[in-house]
Amino acid sequence: MNITNKVALVTGGGTGIGRATCLALAERGATVVVNYSRSEAEAEETVQMIANRGGRAVAIRADIARDKEVRDMVDAVVRRFGTVDALVNNAGITRHIAFDDLEAATEDVWDELYDVNVKGMFYCARAVAPSMRKQQEGAIVNLGSIAGLTGLGSSLPYAVSKAAVHGLTKSLARALSPHIRVNCIVPGAVATRWWTGREEQMKKLAPQLLLQRISTPEDIARAICAALEQEAMTGQIITVDSGQTL
């Protein structure tokens, strides 16, 4: 897919990987819809950054864990721009819980992480599918995590939710073929605000990686754009982790 003049919706687009992806898409000539749930100021700042560079973007609020809000958001985008050509399912949350503390992985924690990290991605994909099917073209990229590959991560429920994202990607690729492609980018450690308060831990990790560097949001954004653009690929789980999982 040539991104130029396409309409791209990025969930969680106000910060980190989401912001970097919005900027990268805008640089490629896309109209960018910056979704946010709570980070309104950051989302509007992303829009302004794109506008300052001569691009086109709007911010729109929706809690992706709520199906009605997702459908209303996509309806608003279609009314304004005519369609949604590309979806980047970037929004996600975590809880930092010791793996051996099974009691801390409460029902509320499981529900919260699955509602956003898994069901939210499904809701977004389902909402954009009719427009993509109508035009017989569309691309979706989900954001997974190496936690879903290794079973390690910020918490046990988080790792399991990301493994579910990888499975969701393959199932959606089948369900939405042949006109809608669905792939998954799987980052390792990325220098975002998720490391707030643990910066020293991040610095110690870098020399242990094969490439001896922590990925940047821009690294992941370029991979996302490549997956959107590659028309001969669907259902793939693509790891971008500086060799962390080798």
Image (cartoon, helix red, strand yellow):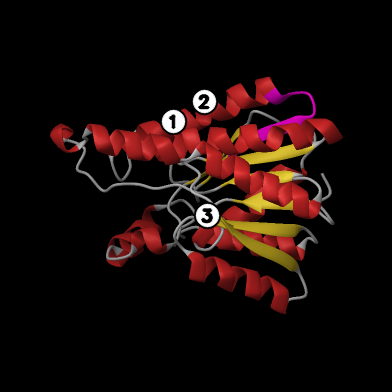
Give the CA distance from mark 2 to mark 1: 7 Å
Counting labels gives 3
Q: Is residue 180 magenta?
A: yes
* Kind of residue at badge 1: Ala
Q: Is residue 78 magenta?
A: no
The nearer-to-camera label among 3 and 1 is 3
Q: Which mark is residue 185?
A: none
Give the CA distance from mark 2 to mark 3: 21 Å
> Label 1, on which residue?
163
Hey, which quadrant is residue 101 in on the image? top left
Evaluate if marks 2 and 3 touch, with contact meaning CB atoms under 8 Å apart: no
Q: Which mark is residue 167?
A: 2
Bounds of the magenta segment:
176-184
Q: Which mark is residue 12?
A: 3
* Kind of residue at badge 2: Gly
Evaluate if marks 3 and 1 touch, with contact meaning CB atoms under 8 Å apart: no
Q: Secondary structure at mark 1?
A: helix
Q: On the rendered image, what quadrant is the C terminus found in?
A: top left
The nearer-to-camera label among 2 and 3 is 3
Q: For the point 57% across and 43% down, which residue is it?
A: 70
Q: For the point 71% across and 48% down, which residue is it?
A: 226
Q: For the point 61% across and 45% down, which residue is it?
A: 72
Give the left or right position of residue 159, taking residue 210 as reference: left
Q: Position of residue 118 (x, y in %)?
A: 47, 34
Sooner in the amino-acid sequence: mark 3 or mark 1: 3
